[in-house]
Amino acid sequence: MRKVLFSFVLLLCFFGLLVLFSAYTDDSQQKSTITATGSATDLAQIVQPPEIPASVDFAGEAFPMDNFDVKERLDRELIANSYRHSGTIGYLKRSGRYFPTIERILAENGMPDDLKYLAVAESGLENATSPAGAKGFWQFMKSTGRAYGLYSSSEVDQRLHLEKSTVAACKYLRKLKNQFGSWTLAAAAYNMGETGLKKNLASQKSTSLFDLNLNSETMRYVFRIAAIKTIMQNPRKYGFYVDDYQKYPPLAETYNVEVKGAVSSWATWAQNNGMTYRELKIYNPWLKDSKLVNKERKTYLVKVIKRQ
C-alpha cells in the first residue's frame, strides 16, 4: 500500500513539474514575441480623421473646397486641433468668459463676428507673450500697438487690456481689409505683415490668398482659424463635450475708478477699494507693476468689482 501511495505522489510531482515547465515555455515565447514586435497585442484604440465640411467660410468669404490643395490644408488643421485636446478644451472653456466682450466690441465696430476666432488662433484667449515680444489676446507688437492707441511702459501695458486691444484690433483689421480687399488676405497680413503680403501678391501675380505660396506659418494661419471656428461652432461633432456650465463664466460686474496721479502701492489701493491685490490684477492685467509713478500724468480707468 505504501509503495502504491509513494508511486502516486511521484506521479503527481511529475505532472506538476510538467505543468510548470509548460507555463515557463509559454511565458518565454510570449516575452520573445513582445521583444520582437514591441507589443503582445494590438493597441486598443480608435483614431478617426475628423470630418471635412462640405463648405467653409471666414467672415462670409467661402473657401474653394473643390480645390484639393485647399481641402487638404484645412484637413491638416482640423486634425491638429481635433487631437490637440487640452488646447482646444481650453479654448472652449475660456470662450464663455471672453467671447461676450469680444463679440460686443466687434459688433459695435461693424466687424465680422468671425474675427473672434483670430484671437483664439493668436493667443488661445489668454494674455500670452510670444518669443518675438507680441502680447495680449490679439498679439500686438509694441510698435503696432502704439500706432493703434495702446500705450505700454514699465508700469502699464494696454496690449493686455482686453477691451482696448480688441478696439485696436478692429481698427487694424479694418485697415488691412480696405488695403487688400478681403478678410482672408487681411488675416494673412495680420500674421505676416503688410509689406510681406504686398510683395508676394505682386511677385506671384495673384489676388487670392488660396493661390499664394507663402511662408509655412502664414500658409497655415487662415486655415487654422477656419478649423478652430469649425470645431468651436460644433464641438461635439469633433469629440469635445464641454457643456455651458463647464465654461468659465464672465467676470463679475465692475465699475471704473479714474486714476490720474501716482499710486504708491496697488495692494493698498485695492484694499481701499474693496478688492484683494490678486483680484485687482485679474481684472486689470494691464497693470504691470506693484505701484504707479505715472510721470506722464496719464489718466487710467481701473476696474473695481461691484460688491452686493
Image (tube, rainbow, N blue to C red):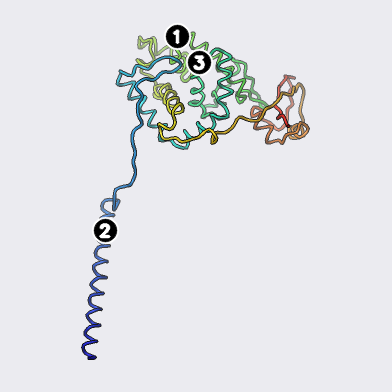
Nearer-the-camera pick, 165 or 110: 110
For marks 1 and 2, the one nearer the N-term is 2
Q: Quadrant of residue 7?
A: bottom left
Query: Residue 252: image x %, image y %?
Result: 66, 30
* Disc number for residue 112: 3
* Disc number for residue 30: 2
Q: CA distance from mark 1 to mark 2?
A: 65 Å
Disc 1: which residue = 181
> Which mark is nearer the camera, 2 or 3?
3
Classify 205 as above or below 278. above
Classify 177 as above or below 293. above
Residue 220 falls left or right of residue 15: right
Answer few, some or many: residues within 10 Å of disc 3's Cα (few below 14, many 20 plus, some between 14 and 19).
some
For marks 1 and 3, the one nearer the N-term is 3
> Which mark is nearer the camera, 1 or 3?
3
Query: Residue 85: image x %, image y %?
Result: 44, 37
Q: Which of the image's four quarters has the C terminus?
A: top right
Answer few, some or many: residues within 10 Å of disc 1's Cα (few below 14, many 20 plus, some between 14 and 19).
few
Query: What amino acid does circle 2 point to?
Result: Gln
**Which element is circle 2 on?**
helix
Q: Which of the image's four quarters has the N terminus?
A: bottom left
Residue at the spot 35% in from the left edge and 9% down from the top edge = 205
**Which element is circle 3 on?**
loop
Residue 218 falls left or right of residue 162: left
